[in-house]
Image: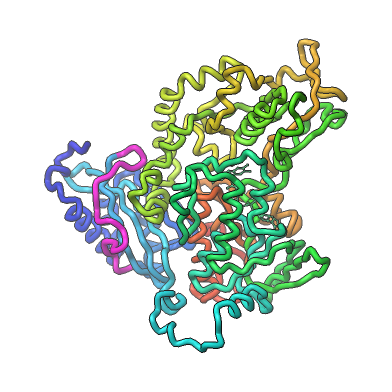
Amino acid sequence: MFESSAMNDSRNPVAIGSRWLADFAVAVATSDAARLSALLEPGGHWRDVVSLTWANRRRSGDDVPGALLDAARTVGLRDLRLSERFPAPRFAKRSARDVLEVFFDFTVDAGEGTGIARLVPGADDNWVAWIVFTSLQRLRRDAMPPDPGDPEEVYRDPRDTWSRRREEEQRHDGEPEVLIVGAGQAGLTLGAYLRRLGVDALLVEKNARVGDNWRQRYDSLVLHTPKQVVPLPFLPYPETFPMWIPKDQYADWLEHYASALELNVWTAAEVTGAEYDDAEGRWTVRIARSDGSETVRRPPHLVLATGGGYGSIPYIPDLPGLDEFGGEVLHSKHYVNGRAYAGKRAMVVGVSTSGHDIAYDLCEWGAETTMLQRGTTVLVSPHMANQAYGAYLTGEQSVEELDLIGASGFIEPVTVSALRALTRQAVEYDRELIESVTRRGLRLDQGPDDTGWMLKSIKLSGGYYINAGASFAIAEGRIAILDAAELVRFDERGAVLRDGTRRPLDLIVLATGFLEPQEDVRAILGDEVAEKMGNVFRFDEEGEHTDMWRPTAQRGLWIMGGGIPTARNYGRYLALHLAAALRGLHPLYQSAGDVAEAPAETR
Ligand SMILES: Cc1cc2nc3c(=O)[nH]c(=O)nc-3n(C[C@H](O)[C@H](O)[C@H](O)COP(=O)(O)OP(=O)(O)OC[C@H]3O[C@@H](n4cnc5c(N)ncnc54)[C@H](O)[C@@H]3O)c2cc1C
């Protein structure tokens, strides 16, 4: 653990944390860059989510003091104090390093924030921050709705019943403050945060029922993320839920969630297009109902929660001869189960999660199954994959606390070195599993910069498989692996291979992923907005996601998405952006139409 004399001067983490925070507060109050520098580890990092920068920003090394103090002056950073809601300063291991972790609260002009400092022993017997993280958590009191716990609420007009109010809210005859396209987990998550902030949001979902997006996925699908990691905000799962929630159970949960959290969702209603009026600062959104009618709504803010991050429009690769194939061709999005293929011959194109799941399903239903491998993939056992979730699995800390800790460490160089260490352990632990499939010809990789599956998941939304059984079937030779280099072309009856043989096929499943999320924007808002937005949900030079949960290049347009834990963690910040914009607290939205677009540094 800690060997430095700084550590020996006191083992009292609260005393050390309080002292560092008091010095930090003085450096901020006096705008003293030299003083602040002395409190930071050389090469250390500052990450801010909304509170000081109204964006997601990361600065490192010498850039930190100046940038932090500039931002602090602009937003009125003050009243730094040890956090009341989160644990007192303590020693902990974070991102593979021993640190003293200090949660602190602070005030800015727009509201209240929470930060985390990860302290390490410095060169001069002092404690310095390796990482300072700052985030906005609440808007100031006059911009927040009354607490639901207000005892005065008992004095109500008896005619004003909950059912009547809900019916009216749900019908939503007026103009919403925010219109959210899509009521999947991301749209619902944002809707719940917005409701808590008193924002009038309307969710528009093209499916007949909330949860149908999961019901329509393949029958055998269970969440690949353990239940402790994927709760939605404000409502934990019942203890009786299984560790890996089956997709239909999850679909029903989403429907229940929408009702329990009193979200206003129009189902069987598709957003077919929208235009933004710069002068008025409002969208004109066209909504087609399944009964053939069309409705228009004019909200100031439009959020796309249509599956962005993963994309929702199937990617169909250009495989030679595929259009000549006489059998059935399906994208994984439309695969249901292998019941009809018992005794038939199937090829699954793609070796990521869906490819493995679907090949395993076909194999277990009795189809002769081959996986066609084009790119490499990461393979990891569930045991080792779960190591990345750490404390979420023990349930000893709140999800809110863990989300903050996660956000404080989401700094690319920090994440990379922590995940590398984890990947080394995983490769060792999973050696037999890995050898058993590579022996059968499956080509694996260890993720970008040897970071394993998680960064691939975050950065590329795929390219890995957490073994849910398919790897055993591959090792036993029950699922065959065919390298794409061996394939010459498809013809009417199947695959023609380089060695001159043929592989007859009845079914080809394309588990080949989805088009870039930018195409979701194009499909709904057209070329001009899509081009203006550029790449959605990729990484900028500071290692932050582009466009997601933060101001975009298109005024009034926001993108919500990500995997379930990420959407929960960052959806709260998008909700704060929106509420601040509506209540006149957001620097980019002081009044309608006064800023044409977000400056690049906030995007
Ligand atoms: C097979 C599979 C398994 C996955 N498993 C996990 C997992 O275990 N853990 C995890 O964290 N993530 C998982 N993911 C990734 C991700 O969490 C899911 O894709 C998730 O469904 C994304 O949620 P979302 O709300 O962003 O998008 P979606 O679930 O795709 O929801 C978008 C909604 O928008 C609606 N919509 C789209 N266009 C319009 C329109 N024009 N008008 C109205 N409505 C519209 C759609 O009908 C849909 O209901 C998985 C993804 C896939 C494909």
Give the answer, above or below, for where 528 lies relative to 363. Answer: below
User: Which residue is at the front of the view, 66 or 576?
Assistant: 576
User: Which residue is at the front of the view, 225 or 590?
Assistant: 225
Q: How is the image coloured?
A: rainbow
Verify whether residue 87 appears in magenta.
yes
Say which residue appears at 44% left-offset and 87% top-offset.
155
Q: Furthest residue to the front?
A: 240
> Taking the image as drawn, is residue 281 in sight?
no
Count of numbered badges drawn on the protein: 0
When asked about the image quadrant of residue 532, the answer is bottom right
When asked about the image quadrant of residue 174, the answer is bottom right
> Taking the image as drawn, is residue 287 in sight?
yes
Q: Which residues are magenta?
A: 78-97
Q: Furthest residue to the top?
A: 499
Quadrant housing the N terminus: top left
Q: Give the left or right position of residue 106, taking residue 193 as reference.
A: left
Image x and y of residue 552, in percent: 60, 59
When asked about the image quadrant of residue 264, the answer is bottom right
Image x and y of residue 279, in percent: 68, 75
Image x and y of residue 22, in percent: 22, 61
Say which residue appears at 34% left-offset and 51% top-offset.
397
Say which residue appears at 63% left-offset and 38% top-offset.
220
Verify whether residue 340 appears in magenta.
no
User: Which residue is at the front of the view, 438 or 376?
Assistant: 438
Q: Give the left or right position of residue 31, taking residue 504 as reference.
A: left
Image x and y of residue 580, in percent: 50, 71
Quadrant housing the C terminus: bottom right
